[in-house]
Image (tube, rainbow, N blue to C red):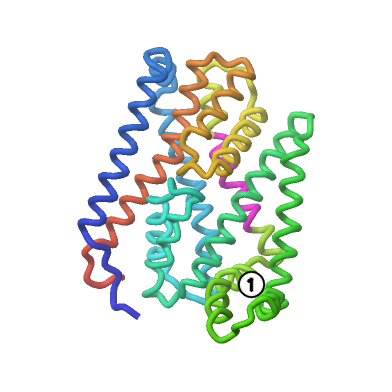
Amino acid sequence: MPESIRLPAHWIRALAVFIGIGAALYLGAIVLSGAQASVSSMSRLGWPLVAAGVVLVAMSLLLRFARWHWLIARLGKAVPALYNLRVYLAGLALTSSPGKLGETLRSVLLLRRGVPFSGSLGAFLADRGADVVGMAALGAAAGWWLGHRSTLLEVLTVGLVFSSASLAWLVRLGWTDSLVSRLVRNPCRMVAALTSLLSPLTAWARLWMPAASLAYATIAFCAYGLQALVFGLYVDALGSDIGMARCVLIFSISILLGAASMVPGGLGATEAALIYQLTDAGMPPADAVAAAIALRLSTLWFAIMLGVLALLSFAGRGKEP
């Protein structure tokens, strides 16, 4: 096990520059597309409300970190909470990667704490799966709150819960190992290779027990519920009477569509979904653009900047605490 994890300083600088360019392009696109009307709408939000929104988003990230820390602990690995917090936040620097796969950087940072790749990747799968289930459930709950059910979100929630539970049960039974042994004629090399690829799935199955998986999804429900609340507050501050429940539903659908697009960070897809649904609900286009951009700055870009700061804490250190 390495004595310390050192990330090359030039690699960190390059990443920071890359993210900075991305933020500049994002803000530039806002100015070019929305012009003065959207900028004027954003100014009506006011710094106190935006600051309160960032605090609520920070609370949602802490909830998700608590789940991550629990997942690692369930692997039987005692990682110090502050170290694991830095690891978790560092992964957010690459949250704009397709499917958030860049967040698997955490696996590298956890190696020196004795957490194998298979375990941390299994925890990543559980983490992402719980987010999708929790987000779908949040949207379904908002539909119930509004008085008209969102059948698609309900089916998605129930389908994900039962399909993932069934897959985890089959993996725990050794079904995947048996299938590989039957399909592969050369067990000497290929089975060994496939077994190594399946090891994160095995770790995920141990973590994805029925009660625990529902707890993971409940944490996601609460964490993303806070972010949806921030979105609702922004929409309300811009003078819209859409209502909080409708905002929660719009938020849930938009984030899920952004994730399904596999575009890094859902950039473009999420914003388009937010703006389309807000204008369809009667919000002026300039205000809809402002609400969408304010939300993304408070959530996605805030998380990325926290991630960069956490990554910098790993660069050039001699010994980790």
User: Neighbour class for label 1 at 10 Å: few (<14), some, many (≥20)?
Assistant: some
In front of the other: 48 or 261: 261
Rendered view: 108 above or below 98? below
Rendered view: 304 above or below 2? above
- The residue sitting at 55% across, 70% down in the picture is 200
Residue 211: where, in percent of width, then height?
71, 64
Residue 212: where, in percent of width, then height?
66, 64
Judge whether residue 172 can be spotted in this image.
Answer: no
Q: Secondary structure at mark 1?
A: helix
Q: Which residues are magenta?
A: 216-229
**Residue denoted by label 1:** 206
Instruction: Look at label 1 and name its amino acid.
Output: Arg
Q: Is residue 14 left or right of residue 211?
A: left
User: Does residue 222 belong to the magenta stretch?
Assistant: yes
Image quarter for residue 301? Answer: top left
Rendered view: 242 above or below 258? above
